[in-house]
Image (cartoon, rainbow, N blue to C red):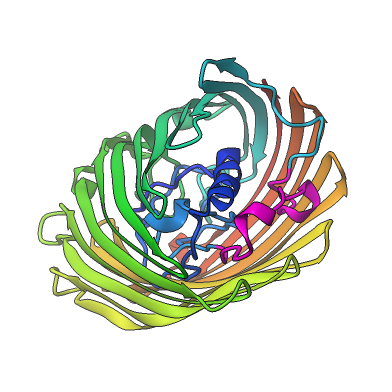
Amino acid sequence: MVRTLAFAEMEAAKTREEKSYSADRSGRRGLLIASAPATAILLGLGSPACAQAIPWTTEEMASPWNAQKIFEPSSLPDLTDPDNREEVPPEDMPVKKRQQPGYEPVGIRAGSWMFNPALISGGFYDSNVFSSGTTKRADAAAVFEPALRAHTLWDRHGIDLKLNTQSTVYNQNSSLDQTNASLKGNAWIDIAHDMALLTNFQIAHLNEGVGTLSAPTNAITPTPYNLLSGDITLRKQFNRLTTSIGFRTDSYDFGSAQAQDGTVINQDGRDGQLYSLHSRIDYAFSSALGWFGGVEGNQRDIRGIPGHTLDSHGYRALSGFTIGLGNLVTGEFGAGYVQQRFDDPTIGTVEGPSYRARLTWRPTPLLDIHFNAEQIVTQTSDTSATGVLANALQLGLDYELRRNVIVSLAGGYETDRFFGQQRKDRVTTSDARVKYLTNRFSSISAYYRYTARDSDVAVFSYDKHLVGLNVTAQF
């Protein structure tokens, strides 16, 4: 089946908002690129319902974090006098990020460090655990996930770390059991009041879930892999003009999966390294309108299978505008060009105009409505190598039913066009979630997700329902 590689995502934790505001107060915060990537490398993280090349996300990133993701959403700077700025109240924060008084975690302070332990336990029911259109099998699974976050409280510079493990145990299909472990970190060094060095890393042992978009065909066990990634970026501000340049690398080492007939599915062909050099420039006309331009060059050294290497090189470039009409409308719209040249002549070159758009509308302080449109290019590997051009439209909302009850609804439609084989897929998804904060020490979340993939190649078509419940204990 399809295999997709991806950059590891940075954790969007509370510290981002705290540090963003701190940067505002010190006058260090500049305009961020609010652009839209045209091409990205994605990695399925083993979610039982993951089917898209472009995952659903409404996560907003704030300064300076997205300096390391030049095509990720960003916000316009606050150009008012730093001495006259006031702290952003909870009702002006995004619904899913705001922390109401009395529901924020307490934490354990040790000197200049703050530690936040958490434990998530729960379970889910999956109507089609193998994501198959011919062999549908339902099962229930239990999930256990302890986590620990540690971050500094320094006035300048900072370190933010998160360590977590996640174990999933199935009731009837024990071959699907898996355990993930990950250590993520990011740090920033204020070289000067208008210059910062930003870094992040991830060391992880993860599993790619059976039946996901990137999993091997006929596998009955998850595919384990080790991930090592890192990024370093230098960011410089010149009044309303902000620039950055950085380098990123990701290394993947895949294990083997087991097929239905008991044979071993070797996934060594997916091992490899990804390198990228990225740069951006942006200018704030005002606190409501900005311009950005970004470019990224990449080299992908992927082993592939005999006769079908997945090595490639390419670039992506976008330019567009950022808008910020107070708390009512925020977003960015970008257009540009993407090109990825594969060494395998059966894939060739995937190139052409590209786009990305993200918009958030807040008609009331209790409701956030999100719209995303995006195109990416990636590569896959199964019994043959191919490239994929994915286009997606996504619409969702977050509603604060009560101060401690958040309701989220989302829907998406994606088309995946495959190069190197006659195949085109259409993916429809819907998602509903409710989160209830009992107090600052615990919360309960319930969710439902539906996924349907309609493929020109019938063996890849399927649909599935996923219903789950999680209980979180935190401090």
Q: Nearer the viewer, residue 313 or 333?
A: 333
Split into 4 quadrants, where in the image is the N terminus?
A: bottom left
Q: Relative to 387, is 348 on the left or the right? A: left
State whether residue 354 appears in this view: no
Which residue sits furthest bottom?
A: 353
Residue 383 horizontal/vertical position (percent): 25, 57
Q: Nearer the viewer, residue 186 or 410?
A: 186
Q: Main secondary structure of the magenta part?
A: loop
Q: Relative to 170, is 195 on the left or the right? A: left
Q: Quadrant of residue 361?
A: bottom right
The magenta-colored residue range is: 75-98
Q: Residue at x 30, y 42 (%)?
A: 229
Q: Residue at x 19, y 48 (%)?
A: 272
* Picture layout, residue 198 above or below residue 293: above
Q: Nearer the viewer, residue 168 or 197?
A: 197
Residue 4 horizontal/vertical position (percent): 35, 56
